[in-house]
Image (spheres, rainbow, N blue to C red):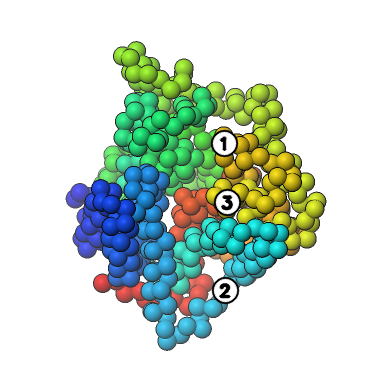
Amino acid sequence: MTMIKDKISGKDTIYFIVSLAVLFVSLFLPTSIALVLTSLFFAAFAFLRPQQSLVFLVIYVSIRPLLVEVNSGVKLVGDLITFVAFLRLLVAARKNLFSLFHFKIFEWALFLLLIAGSISGLMNGVLTSAVIFQVRTFIIMYLLYYIISRSRLPEGWLKSLAWVTVWTGVISSVHGLIEKLSMRQMLLPDVWKYKILSPTNAVRIYGLPGNPNSLALLLFFGILAVLFLQQLYKGEKYKWFFNVNLTLFLGVFILTYSRGTWISAFIFGVLFILMTRNWQVLKRLAIAGLASIILIYFPVNWGVKYFESLGVEPITSHPGSIGNRLGETFDQKNLDLMTESGRFFYIKKGFEIFNDYKIVGSGFGSFGGSATLSYGSPIYDHYGIRSDIYGGKYFYSDNQYIQIITETGVVGVILFAVYLLGMLALFWKQRKTTFGKFMIALWFATGFSGFYYNIWELKMYTMFYFLLFGAFASMTDQYVKFNLKEK
């Protein structure tokens, strides 16, 4: 606790503790009361401490799936913090509101993409609620960027963000190890505990985010946060704390068996180290990586076998391995499955739909996005896409680009390209700075992730991306900035 107080101011610490206490207590209240309590408290929190409340989102978004599974009355906390912080910015800028309408080219491209996708969706029979749902998915985390980029950040804001990320990663990692060793029998809601998983997924750690890929993404940013803090504290202070947690994060990161996040992390690491020529970071990662395999990966898998010998019923016949997970990528059976009902199938169907809606696509909420998970699609039956084709539910396309191609057509592809390249142009202008190089590497890793994730719809990823992008924009004076005085 002393370490937390030392690195996050005393007042901030109190707010964080009280906020966590409110969330915890709300879990045991009736849903309606929990909804009212959390709405009132976090609306006040975001208005009084807008910049700190945005940092608190790291904790909330990381554990939201677990919280909502226990009590759905806490589901509005994230949206409330975001929108109230936005209102707080409007209040701060009330004497110069017109400056808030200054947008970069990538922002205009995003707005036009949302308009084009919405109009196309409505014209093609998508429910209005589904279109709104999809637009919200794209815009909600962008608002984090909008708020932070136009705010005068207090000294140490990035450091606070890093510390909160590290502690969230520590708690999630410890919980994940308990989940793994108990073979999903401890510290999980009953719905998760008894969820039927395929043998491939049963060996993976799902953790507090309730998804191995989301946990891997959290730990990826946790690793970056540790490396950032190591640069700030170059002496002996916290040396062992950072080294232990870097090893812990890498060990659990491996045990998520998240191939996509492994690839993205590798791309980021290679680009950032080459651009900065910071070989010391490579040395730290190599040592911590070796230590994580020796001290986390092998002992945990041996532990699983040991508890199995004591009579704990295993979910699958093997604890999993890196080799098996990587080997499955090019396994013929797996490739056939992807062709019949997986990623290759979605790409094939996406282009089939695109051929019929070339100019503006079939519209938001019609193919493989967040909205179709909840609302389905009016065109699925016509194209032979069944609702039970992927585990008895509607599906993500697991490829951001085929979704954009299918839902928004040629117009959307052009706008999406401007959106992406517009961000890269901002980073490129700052390529001589460490932060600029960091964002360039993150941009390329994000872009590559789009080939196997709906990356711009994953809240865990876009939260971190836009928090960091917003800080970058604020620190490089991309907009008129306002002082959001915290009380």
Mark 2 surroundings: few (<14), some (14-19) or many (≥20) residues within 10 A: few
- Sequence-wise, the earlier of marks 1 and 3 is 3
- Quadrant of res 54: bottom left
Q: Residues within 10 Å of mark 3 (few under 14, many from 20)?
A: some
The residue depicted at 63 percent of the width and 44 percent of the height is: 397
- Residue density around tag 1, few if under 14, some if 14–19, many if 20 or more, within 10 Å: few
Horizontal placement of 138 versus 11: left or right? right
| Image coordinates for residue 9, horizontal then vertical, percent | 24, 61
Q: Amino acid at mark 3?
A: Tyr
Residue occupying image coordinates x 57% and y 74%? 103
Q: Secondary structure at mark 3?
A: helix
Is residue 235 at all visible to an observer of this figure? no
The type of residue carrying mark 1 is Gly
CA–CA distance in space, label 3 to label 2: 32 Å
In the rendered image, residue 259, in percent from the top left (x then y), is placed at 55, 35
Query: Would you name the residue on which mark 1 appears?
Result: 392
Q: Secondary structure at mark 1?
A: loop
Residue bearing the label numbered 3: 375
Which residue appears at 50% of the width and 75% of the height?
Answer: 479
First of labels 2, 1 by sequence position: 2
Where is residue 108 drawn, in percent x and y?
62, 70
Q: Residue 321's mark?
A: none
Label 1 vs label 3: CA separation? 14 Å
Q: Which mark is residue 103?
A: 2
Disc 2 versus disc 1: distance between alpha carbons? 42 Å
Give how far across and how far down residue 72 sits, in percent: 37, 51
- The answer to whether one can see residue 462 in this image is yes
Hey, what amino acid is under mark 2?
Answer: Phe
The secondary element bearing badge 2 is classed as loop
Q: Nearer the viewer, residue 385 or 164?
A: 385
Q: Are marks 2 and 1 in contact (CB under 8 Å)?
A: no
